[in-house]
Image: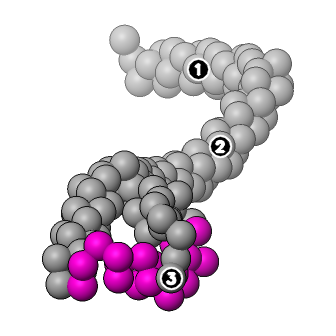
């Protein structure tokens, strides 16, 4: 094969490659045009996803903040429940009242022993019963059994 024939064949191949390249470019442009709306939609969805991620991270921060606030409120509620239970136990505990009544009975007996039975009625009459009106049992302790002097 001669150089001229070889150059002729190379020219034919170059023309074929050139026309094939042009056809490929045309096909690529057609595919790009037909899928351009899909690429735009993908980009839009990517932007939306970024916005949602920002919203999710903000919501997550608020959830963590509210969880900490809830834990604090639960702790305070437990403290209040403990205080209420303690206060209720103190209010239902009548041991101090019983001790007070016993002490009053002892004082009454001592006064009776010191002064005598008749003089005790005079002491009862002198005591202001109004201060004991809130406790009927205490007022009954000081109520005169016999008429005062």
Q: What span is in magenta?
A: 115-133
Q: Position of residue 72 (x, y in %)?
A: 42, 60
Mark with earlier residue (3, 1): 1
Real-space Cα separation, disc 1 to disc 2, in angstroms = 49 Å
- Disc nearest the viewer among 3 and 2: 3
Residue farthest to the top? 1
Q: List the residue tagged with mark 2.
A: 52
Mark with earlier residue (3, 2): 2
Measuring 50% from the left and 88% from the top, which residue is drawn there?
126
Give the colour scheme of this rendering: one colour
Measuring 24% from the left and 79% from the top, which residue is drawn there?
116
Measuring 53% from the left and 49% from the top, which residue is drawn there?
63
Measuring 82% from the left and 27% from the top, which residue is drawn there?
37
| Secondary structure character of the magenta stretch overall | helix
Badge 3: residue crowd in 10 Å (few <14, some 14–19, many ≥20): few
In the image, 47: left or right of 4? right
Real-space Cα separation, disc 3 to disc 2, in angstroms = 94 Å
Q: List the residue tagged with mark 1.
A: 17
Real-space Cα separation, disc 3 to disc 1, in angstroms = 142 Å
Q: List the residue tagged with mark 3.
A: 149
User: In the rendered image, which quarter is residue 98 located in?
Assistant: bottom left
Q: Is residue 46 above or below residue 95?
A: above
């Amino acid at each position: 094969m001669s150089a001229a024939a070889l150059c002729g064949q190379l020219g034919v191949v170059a023309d074929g490659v050139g026309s094939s390249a042009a056809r490929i470019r045309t096909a690529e442009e057609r595919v790009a045009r037909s899928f351009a709306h899909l690429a735009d939609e993908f980009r839009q969805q990517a932007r939306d996803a970024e916005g949602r991620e920002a919203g999710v991270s903000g919501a997550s921060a608020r959830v963590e903040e509210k969880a900490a606030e809830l834990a604090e409120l639960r702790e305070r509620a437990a403290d209040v429940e403990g205080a209420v239970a303690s206060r209720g136990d103190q209010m239902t505990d009548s041991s101090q009242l019983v001790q007070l009544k016993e002490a009053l009975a002892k004082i009454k007996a001592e006064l009776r022993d010191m002064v005598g039975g008749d003089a005790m009625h005079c002491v009862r009459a002198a005591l202001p019963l109004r201060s004991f009106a809130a406790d009927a049992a205490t007022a009954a302790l000081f109520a005169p059994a016999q008429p005062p002097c």
